[in-house]
Amino acid sequence: MFIGAGEAAVTPTMSSLIADYFRPELRAKAYSFYMLGGSIGTSLAYLVGASTLYLSTWLQAHAGLLGSFRDWQLVFIFSGLAGLILALLFGLTVREPVRRETAPSTSGAPRLGQILRDLSANLFEKKLAYLAIIGGAVMNVFLIAAQLSWYPTLFVRVFGLQPAEVGGLLAVVGVPSGIVSALASGFIMAWLVKRGRLDAPLIMMLVQAIIWGTLGVAKSLAPSVTTSVALHLITSLSANFGLPAAFFGLTQITHNRLRGQMTALYTIIYGLISITLGPLAVGLLSDYVFTSPTGVAYSLASVFAIGSLTGISLLLIGWKDFVAASIRVKGHTAAAEGQ
């Protein structure tokens, strides 16, 4: 719970900081570099966890105080140490940027009531645009959360691998593909925007949803470890298309003063729906529908199929409104910067 409270502050502040640090034409790339943290971090968690499991017997016998901890506790301890180091570096090096794309204000910081009124009006005015960008992103994260929780279990139950073997295998696949995916997302969006495609974030989300809805199902039902891992590599190459696109898309249709608030709202929604219901859906299907030990494969495949179709539908419903909202905010931004 306390870790979650700390993580909740990261996304809204990150989105606002990047929007102010970087010009609009550079933001897509900046968000993609930011996503490297999640990709590398998730993969390193698998690697650190697997390494700790291999070393746990030695640590418990020779490492003094560490010998009193269990395997899973050691994994948490070693995985969490990096956060303390990064927090110190961030505090010592990152400074508050100058606000971009907003006219100078002499009235001071707005009150909470005014922020909530502005937020409500903004949501009502662009409801279908936000349905597309937030709904599409939420369903993509829904699929990723389901995979993170249950795909390792599939290898244990279906193929008989040991947990330490699975962690190492997924780390080897995840680190390079996650890096390529995150970087590719930003550069592709920047290329699309340069060619006048204001719907670039939605295009990236649509591509990811299609890939996960097809190859995600296929890798869940694959007949061998090799086939499943090969398909997993392809889906991983698109795993970071949606999240940088969501951040970029939100800044594209939201005025500067509300970007942090909208990103916070988006974070709440994907926390409640994606992070919670993605893993839960697979668990419920495994308990009540596909109840055999290998039923997790069919449960995961079903979630991939349903989640991707839902995401594609939400994107298509709000596509035109997203483009229209982007045009309006772009015009408002030009007027504000001219003052």
Image (cartoon, helix red, strand yellow):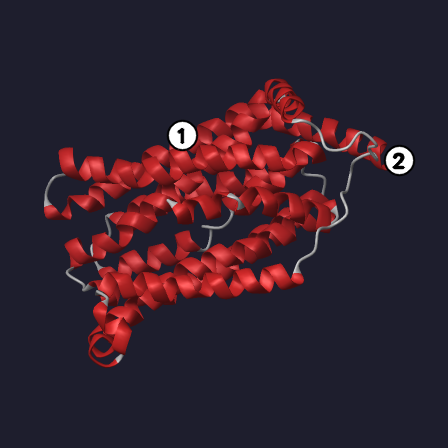
**In the rendered view of the protein, which quadrant contains the C terminus?**
top right
Please tell me whether mark 1 sits on a helix, a strand or a loop: helix
**Residue 37, numbered circle:** none
Q: Is residue 255 above or below residue 234?
A: above
Dot placed on the residue nearer the N-terminal end, 1 or 2: 1
- In the image shown, does 95 or 175 lie closer to the viewer? 95
Judge whether residue 199 can be spotted in this image. no
Q: Is residue 33 above or below residue 248?
A: below
Is residue 140 rendered to the left or right of residue 303?
A: right
Amino acid tagged 2: Gly
- Residue found at x 84% / y 31%: 335
Label 2: which residue?
A: 338
Is residue 306 rendered to the left or right of residue 56?
A: right
Distance in Å between CA atoms under marks 1 and 2: 41 Å
Q: Position of residue 290 (x, y in %)?
A: 15, 38
Using the rendered view, name the quadrant where residue 264 is placed: top right
**In the rendered view of the protein, which quadrant contains the N terminus?**
top left
Q: Position of residue 95 (x, y in %)?
A: 70, 56
**Residue 310, numbered circle:** 1
Mark 2, other Cα within 10 Å: few <14 / some 14–19 / many ≥20: few
- Residue found at x 62% / y 47%: 189
Please tell me whether mark 2 sits on a helix, a strand or a loop: loop
